[in-house]
Amino acid sequence: MVTKTEPTTEFVQELIPYSRRVFCNRNLRMDTIRYIGFDMDYSLALYKPAMEHLQAELVLNSMVDVLGYPRSILALKYDPQFAIRGLVVDTEHGNIFKMNAHRFVGMVWHGGGPLDKEIRRDIYTNRKIDLSDPGLMMVDTQFSLPEMHLYCQLVGLFDKQADNESKPTYDRLWRDLRGAMDVLHSDDSLKTIVRGNIPEYIYKDPDLPETLHRFRSAGKKLFLLTNSEPEYTRAVMTYLLDQGHPGYAKWEDYFDFIIASARKPGFFVGDTPFLHSNEDGSSQSIPVTQLRRGQIYTGGNLQELKQWTGMRGDEVLYVGDHLYGDILRSKRDTSWRTAMVVQELERELLGMQEHGSDLTELDRLESRLFQINLERAAHAIDGNRDRRLQGEARQLNQEVLRLEKQICVHFNHTWGMMVRDRAELSAFGAQMQDYACIYTSRVSNFRLYSPVWYFRSPRQRMPHEQLR
């Protein structure tokens, strides 16, 4: 007699913690991927809040010592919980705002609090944001988050001064802050401090070595492509990978080729030659004609990389965190498949699990509101019934607003969810959806999947297909 077995309901995705999953925007078959490239900063190397505090401290000191700002700015306190990626700086008005996928403005912050409603309406109502405007700057990197909170505090500080006192314009204030931060990264002062105490600033993920090993065991060729300088790259990668797996004597053994000081996004479109890197970080002038395993190179360009390796665009997966420098440009200029590392996503996913009942209730209220508005639009109804529906719609709108505010504080207390602006995707969320084939919170999450896994995107529906 054949014994009937119950179908299993426990799938691989259900065995993986929600906060550690890899999410898919476009189908990706890992069995067709031959090369996997990695950025380093905020991708393989995830930074602690201490890094942002260090950046804030150093940049304020630089603005005082080099640019002549008053010493009073040194009393400003940096809050790493204030900013999220995807915010926009308006340097004409001294504001920071969040916008939705359609480039319309949501929350606006000025100095120490929300912008006055009347002023906000005058500046932004019915204005679709054009990021080609030189007075607007969208911040999409983790390294730039300290600038957002510091800018708000500096704006608030100088707003308190009398108009007849000498003070920088909002635009000058942003350019000085951004310029000072750029110098910290280019003159090695920031990274020298980090190299001196790497565990203070960088998480050591114990699962990362095994993750890379699993990719290699499946026949994937791995490469490192980072803008960081060779000396800093050696220090960070040694900390992350050395002695992490018995099959690898040193960190370089995980990678088939290593490229530092790559100057992305210029790497994808330029013709800078590859150079050998010496142990002291200097580069040799000897022409490079092939990439050798275990050797670190600097500079380089996409065309020679393709010529020497034979890689084709659709067989390369590039893993990075920078939406423009890593994800957008690698997809637009190379046709590489893309995986985006969104470190802060893990915290948001945990929040979604913890407050799932509120999110479910919000969906219910919005669905009911949709039905009411549909009934009002689709039927010719008497005045009493219409007034009743209007009243219910107003009440539901108030409930939706109340619940949205309640949910918001459980994520970012100022801006809410990173990828959403009320009922719409945020501009940052839309760009993630457009340019990242897959995304996750850390590279080691791939360890939880087969290296030949088929990532499938959920079925997308237009509004008329949702049958509600």
Image (tube, rainbow, N blue to C red):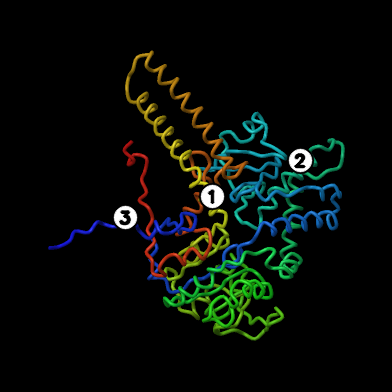
> Residue 303 vs residue 275: left or right?
left
- In three-dimensional space, the C-alpha distance between marks 1 and 2, rounded to whole angstroms, equals 29 Å
Secondary structure at numbered mark 3: loop
Q: Earlier in the sequence, mark 3 or mark 1?
A: 3
Evaluate if marks 3 and 1 touch, with contact meaning CB atoms under 8 Å apart.
no
Tag nearer the camera, 2 or 3: 3
Residue 146 x, y percent position in the rendering: 69, 53
Q: Splitting the image into 4 quarters, where does residue 40 fall?
A: bottom right
Secondary structure at numbered mark 2: helix
User: Image quadrant for the N terminus?
Assistant: bottom left
Judging by the rendered image, the residue that carries numbered circle 3 is 9
Judging by the rendered image, the residue that carries numbered circle 2 is 156
* In the image, residue 361 above or below residue 139: above
Other residues around mark 2 within 10 Å, as few (<14) / some (14–19) / many (≥20): some
Residue 270 x, y percent position in the rendering: 58, 70
- In three-dimensional space, the C-alpha distance between marks 3 and 1, rounded to whole angstroms, equals 27 Å
Judging by the rendered image, the residue that carries numbered circle 1 is 348
